[in-house]
Image (tube, rainbow, N blue to C red):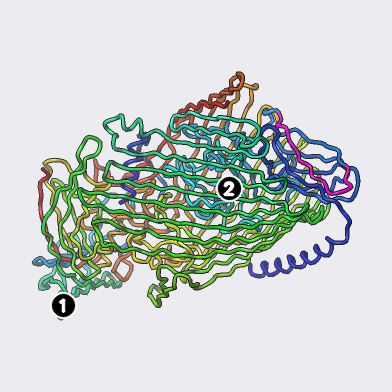
Amino acid sequence: MLKKYFSTILIGIFLLGCEKEIQLPLDPNQSLLVIDGSITDEAGPYYIKLSKSTGISEASNFLAVTGALVIVKDNLGIIDTLKHEKGGSYKTSKLKGSYGNTYYLEVQVADKRYTANATMPQKVALDSLRINPIPINNEIRYNVIPVYADPIQLGNSYRFIQKINDTLDQTFHVFNDNLNNGKVNQRPLRGGSDSLEVKLKDIVDVEMQCITRPVYLYFYTLYQQSGAGPGGGTTPSNPPTNIIGGALGIFSAHTVQRKQIQIK
Amino acid sequence: MAQITRNLILIWSMLCIFQIQFAFGQDKFVLNGNVKDQATGEAMIKAVIRIEELPSLGVLSNEYGFYAIALPKGKYTVVVSQLGYEKYKEQVRLDSNLNLTILLRSANTLKEVVVESGRKNDNLLKPQMGTETLNLNAISKVPVIFGEKDILKTLQLLPGVKSAGEGNSGFYVRGGAADQNLILLDEAPVYNASHLLGFFSTFNSDAIKDATLIKGNSPAQYGGRLSSVLDVKMKEGNNQDFNVNGGLGLISSRLSIEGPLQKEKSSFILSGRRTYADIFLRASDEFKDNVLYFYDLNMKANYKIDEKNKLFISGYFGRDELGLGDTFGIDWGNKTGTIRWNRIVSSRLFSNTSLIYSDYNYNVKLKNGLSNFNINSNIKDLNLKQDYTFYLNPKNTLRFGFNSILHTISPSTFSGTVINSNPKSGRNALENALYISNYYKASDNLSLDYGMRLSTYSLMGGDAYNIYENDMLVNTIRLDNQSFGKTYINPEPRMTANYRVTDQTSIKAGYARNVQHLHLLSNSTASSPSDQWIGNSYNIKPEIADQLSVGFVQGWKNNSYELSTELYYKNLQNQLDYKDGAEIFTLADVESALLFGVGRAYGLELLWKKKEGMLTGWVSYTLSKTERKITGINQNNWYNARQDRTHDIAVVGVYTLNSRWSISSVFVYNTGDAVTFPTGKYSIQGQTLYQYASRNGNRMPTNHRMDLSVTYDKKRKKRIQESWNFSLYNVYGRENAFQINFQDDPKDLSRTQIIQTSLFRWVPSVTYQFKF
């Protein structure tokens, strides 16, 4: 949050910065399994996507992992063995996502086993989206505030995925209630330097997810690492994950709500 | 290391007993007094006082210009030397105790050198290791960015000192972190020594007399930080004459006034500085709401009560403001105040009592329509220091005293309409130290400085202390406001020795343990005003550094050339870092997000100086390694600290053409900082994420740059003295990497591009200075 402002002000002032693409000698990469899986409160099927990470200088055509054994169980005793659909996506057939339930993921690739679990948090209603105009330097900038009332109990975490005119905002927007427990949210989805600017007449789609604490930590770590420089990002590392066994990625159980607003 | 410590303690106590027996039973008189600049009355620090008839004796004036030497009855020739001043000689007859004020006359300015250590072959005589003194008059000619002469930036050109980034006044000494430097302004600790996110230091060069940097082997009167002591002294003010001094630059302007309050008895100096980039910004539509400025004020006055008592009052006030309209604002600043009482207790005992106040705070304001949100943080010190210098005999000078600091630390506290009010009550702590050291001139060739500092840190009431074991909260301790909790006690032995092999050659060795009780928590790769200070607690133990160093100094051509070499090894304990994803602002207790470990640093430092002639300057080279090993980071393996850099080279030259024109140049070359670049990539929910292997296993590209500056001193007209300085930063326009980002190529999303951002190509500046 702060660092975004620092860079805005500094780069605005000095205007001396110049950017160019460079080549660097980079270390070889150890390709790891990547698990990208979510169980939501929307109607199924749900997908668990398996792929392999690739070297930084290679093309981002991530190798799909097929032929894995993927099982998701829940605390009600349902055992769902996922079927590979295409491109490393494994599909559930009988599981039904709902809040309060715990989901246990088990992935077996060759002779390696990976596990994770997540309990879907309670849904907090997204009441509306509010436009927040910020007049600075003879122009008005905008951002969007998701309006929701945080419940009295401490420990709620949220993730917001913002699309501006159908383009994904690359900033990781994750909130928790450490400071504003039990209050109506007034914090906007602040764009980072790497995100799109919200302009007049734009259509903004916001997806609100009520997420678990490990998922919050995962995305918050990514958020902190984004942006380097004055007051800038933390030293990057692979974010802490709830997957046991040495895979990258995250397994999430979350609720989903969507709203749209036009900036005017 | 523990063994070494025990042995040193043993040696130290044996020496003490031996010294005291040796000291008594000699019938002597004392010659003492003050060393001053004849023109301004400023006290001369570390002038060398020698007796021509007894060449093996020699004392140095202390921080207040006071000296004392005990001699048998007789006739003597007193010789006093100080670099940049004419040699002083006077005949004295000693048949009783004698007070002699020594007035030194400034020598031809052509002879000035930028880095000096007192007398020309002083470095050969003194036992101090890793010590450099910067003279403010002399650094004025070294080019710096924006034409603002700055001691912190000039310091970075010395071996063992690394800059925290291009144009940044933050610095790292011998592998230590930025918070491991004790920065003192007239004895008051300065918690954030930078303005404008590091581009300027808090030290207004017009108000500063000199600055001494001690790289780890500090004498026992200093303590509290692991890596270095930067002791900055403000000018006292001219006690002969009124002077107005000023400078106009592109970024900032300065003005200072000094003069006598009572002629030759007391004086004052008042100095202010402000940047004005914001004034230009306000005129432009595009940036009219950007707020960005700082100002600072230095003030000092001294009053001579009588021949034996002198009082000094000094203060500093500085503030930075940064903001974006009503939406965002951050301001921060230091306040320090020092009252000092110098007293000549007896002809051989000099006392200084200081009462010091120091305050650093920052405030962040965020506003969104009707809602607002604030963060405040503050650290306050009340500090009492008592220091004695006892001139026992010509061979022994004892320093002893105590220091007691009451810290009040309020970590980030939030308020505003957006959030629940959750006031944190801050923490108090009492830091105490007792010390004694002896400067022992064992023979004509051998001198020793050895001592012991005992530091303690006691937790006091305030906010609750949580105790964690294996990430689990196991206990919470609440202390009443007046009561004490755990006390940490740490002995800190120190010793340096100097052996003069010939008139031009000497060897040195030293060991020092330093203990640090306050820690700066920072999770960003660059310094930020919002980095928080935190004291020891039940989880956070005092940081400890043991440093061993050896050195060799060789002079040539009557010591007008000098090469000094030092090797050091440093072992660090109880180092801190954050866990990944730690929410340092919003966590109820930041201690739950800390990790602990150890560190080590070693290196070789070379400094070759040319001290005389038309061309003066130096070449410095550092070869070093700095590593950390923290449980929970890098699979618990050793990794390069962020400030690790293999090679650092600086070349500084000042060429004086004549009394008007001089040209100076700086060239720097260093290995890039240790950073973490991704080795691979993967995709999660449609976004490209990066895969990392070992921490700080990569390097930023190599940095190098050359700066030039030309100074023109106009001929003095009546009282007015004017000078112009033109400088060009980064002469050949090298694009040094400021940051490197990895991103999807917008033209081909399956390709990753590496984007380098660089700042500051060809920054010209002009500064006009006047004095009347």
Label of residue B186 in the image: 2
Residue B103 magenta-drawn? yes
In this rendering, do the residues under marks 1 and 2 share a single chain?
no
Q: Position of residue B151 (x, y in %)?
A: 55, 40
Q: Is residue B391 above or below residue B714?
A: below
From the viewer's side, name the closer residue of B11 and B756. Answer: B11
Q: Which residue of the protein is positioned furthest toward the left in this rendering? A: A43
Name the amino acid, label 2: Asp
From the viewer's side, name the closer residue of A18 and A94. Answer: A18
Query: Gap in Å between the C-alphas at discs 1 and 2?
Result: 72 Å
Residue A16 magenta-drawn? no
Residue B679 placement: quadrant: bottom left
- The quarter of the image holding the C terminus of chain B is top right
User: To which chain does the residue with label 2 belong?
Assistant: B
- Which residues lie in the magenta part? B93-107
SS at mark 1? strand
Q: Position of residue B53 (x, y in %)?
A: 88, 43
Q: Residue at x 75, y 46 (%)?
A: B124
Q: Which residue is mark 1?
A: A79
From the viewer's side, name the closer residue of A250 and B268. Answer: B268
